Amino acid sequence: MLTQRQQDILRLIIQNYTQTGQPVGSKKLMEEGINASSATIRNEMKALEEYGFLQKTHSSSGRVPSMNGYRYYVDFLLTPAQVEQTDMQMIRQSFGREFHEINEIIQQSADILSSLTSYTALSLGPDMKERRLTGFRIVPLNERQIIALIVTDKGNVESQVFTIPRTVSGEDLEKMVRIINDKLIGESLITVYHRLRTEIPMILHKYFQTTEGILDLFDSLLGNAFEEKIFVGGRMNVLDFGPTTDVDQFKTIYSFMKDPEELTQLLVPSDEDIRIRIGNELGIELLQNMSLVQANYEITGHGQGTIALLGPTNMPYSKMFALIDVFRRELASKLAEYYRSLDSYN
């Protein structure tokens, strides 16, 4: 569709605009190596504008990319940049410290990526529906309150403060915990989830007059264990590049970024290792001036995870593509190392 010269012009305009935020004119393109007269370049820019790839600003004779221009660039012209050595060092140093559970690594990944880019980073750990229960325990806080914990073989820990119903004594609660551990330790969480709704209530009712509230506690804890957790780094960085001049818009973006369900839905399943969605492709009007770079990674035997960057549409795509590609590999390597350490310990 485009000639080689038109492709070169579009590529240079996007690269310059994403670096400077300033419209690009024919003189700049000549300086960047387009071997044509100023008049010829302006004609080519006009053609690209007619194709819908460029927009003319009212303030100058220069052009800026349109959403379609970014899309064409990402699909056909993008060449990943070289990742800077300082960025590589920061990634490896941040993953080099000791971690005590999987969620620490996933949260750290979002924090690192956000720090490197000043964008908002989203991170979802590998799918672990086959993880197994290795322990359920309670820690007394006072006469009526406890901290309840469940631990899995993959290093996940879920905890919740819980008030014991007055109808249940502390002694009875400890007996219930022993029974549940005896019946469920070593089972997959899916099995645990189903048996707590079928077999376990009948067993507890045989031994205790009332189990009021106790099964609700397990429901709540296991709900958290099954819940797909999204970890966010630089949550409010979107306010730096989003349309925040309007107070209501500001509040809406703030609420959106605090909603885990909304953020999780932003990450759509994809067979591509790295996928870039731009503006309206995100399907959320609020984010129409933003782009999402989403990358998948695979941990053998443990499923697939996702890491993503939410930033402005004029982000430097070649740099972000290269950075997230390196990052997903480093994250996968760290997680695989952590899983191996768990297996050797067990």
Image: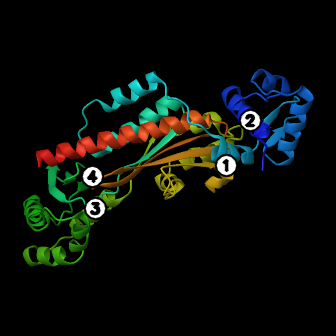
Q: Nearer the viewer, residue 263 or 177?
A: 263
Q: Please give left or right for residue 311 compared with residue 140 in the image.
A: right
Residue 275 in the figure: left or right of residue 30? left
Q: Is residue 141 visible?
A: no
Q: Is residue 16 left or right of residue 117?
A: right
Pointer 4 with pointer 1, Cβ within 8 A: no
Disc 4 and disc 3: Cα gap in Å? 11 Å
CA separation in Å, label 4 and label 2 = 57 Å
Q: Are marks 4 and 2 in contact (CB under 8 Å)?
A: no
Image depth: mark 3 or mark 1 in front: 1
Q: Secondary structure at mark 1?
A: helix
| Neighbourhood count class around disc 4 (C-alpha, 10 Å): few under 14, some 14–19, many 20 upward | some
Q: Which residue is mark 1?
A: 279
- Dot 3 or dot 1, earlier in sequence: 3
**Residue type, label 2:** Asp
Q: What label sits on residue 8 in the rendered view? A: 2
Reading the image, the residue beneath label 4 is 160
For marks 2 and 1, the one nearer the N-term is: 2
